[in-house]
Amino acid sequence: MSFQSILGNFALILFVLTIVTGIIWFLDIFVFAKQRRQNADKALAEYDARRAKLSAEGIRLEENTRHDIEANLLRQPVWIEYSGSFFPVIALVFFLRSFLFEPFKIPSSSMLPTLYVGDLILVNKFTYGIRLPVINKKIISINDPQRGDVMVFKYPEDPSVDYIKRVVGVPGDKIVYKNKRLSVNGKEVSYANMPDFRDNLNYLKQYKEQLTGVTHNILVNEQKPVYDRGQVLDFKDKESCSYEIDGFSCTVPQNRYFMMGDNRDNSADSRYWGFVPDENIVGKAFFIWMNFGDIERIGSFH
């Protein structure tokens, strides 16, 4: 499932705006404001001299004229005023979005029943490490993704597109998915029957999956095969996977992650396009802050 940031893919735009407005703000404080002050002082000195001359001739001027002249000369141009006003706001948004939390909107059903179409979610940008904005380069390591995490990442086939899936395999894991059942390192994941789930006009089998300590629900369409062989791409490290009629197995390479959607038979995931490199990680999804179609969706999820 692909999806885009709620604000659009504009990390670069925010960065440029922050830099431009910041430079203007800086120049105004240390250059332009001083120039305006110098010009004002010169004009006021000339005004005072003229006023003194007229006063000596018995001509009186309005008292507030000097104040008005000074205010007009010190007033910021509109473009500087707006830049200075927007800079702290843009800089704050850029910092929050780049290093702390980023909002996204879910556009498809590949993560049902965990995430619904229209869910507005927050993604923790720092839990897996601090990354430089725009280029997404990790500079400080904090935590590694764990099995069961719902993770946002750059789609390996097109890094301009953001995807969201669940981490099923971490580096070194052997993942086996056969007959709609998942095994990790030779141990089959436990499943518990749940009431059928209605997705539009279809009723799907629903199970509670216990993925190495993380409990969440998944959906299975028993009318569909384990995977569509015709959709499997020629991805990097494909030799680490073995595809058979009833399923497949993959050994996760170092610095790679194996991802699957909770809506198992309606998800384009690692079984089709391969592993997610560490450098593609965006962050961990953890909270639904709004769904305008169903406000009861608000809250955390696993």
Image: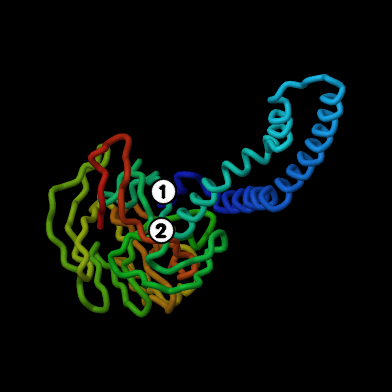
Q: Which mark is residue 29?
A: none
The C terminus: image quadrant: bottom left
Who's the residue at 52% across and 60% down the image?
157
**Is the Cβ of the residue at disc 1 closer than 8 Å to that at disc 2?**
yes
Furthest residue toward top: 59
Whole-percent x and y of residue 115? 30, 49
Q: Which mark is residue 152?
A: 2
The residues tagged by marks 1 and 2 sit, at their Cα atoms, a distance apart of 10 Å
Whole-percent x and y of residue 280? 48, 65
Front residue of 222/35: it is 35
Under tag 1, what secondary structure?
strand
Residue indicated by mark 1: 104
Front residue of 247/68: it is 68
Front residue of 232/266: it is 266
Under tag 2, what secondary structure?
strand
Tell me how the rendering is colored.
rainbow
Who's the residue at 50% across and 54% down the image?
161
Whole-percent x and y of residue 202? 24, 41
Looking at the image, residue 130 lies above or below residue 296? below
Front residue of 276/90: it is 90
Q: Residues within 10 Å of mark 1 (few under 14, many from 20)?
A: many
Who's the residue at 85% across and 24% down the image?
54
Whole-percent x and y of residue 283? 40, 61
Looking at the image, residue 139 lies above or below residue 217? below
Q: Amino acid at mark 2?
A: Val
Q: Residues within 10 Å of mark 2 (few under 14, many from 20)?
A: many
Q: Amino acid at mark 1?
A: Phe
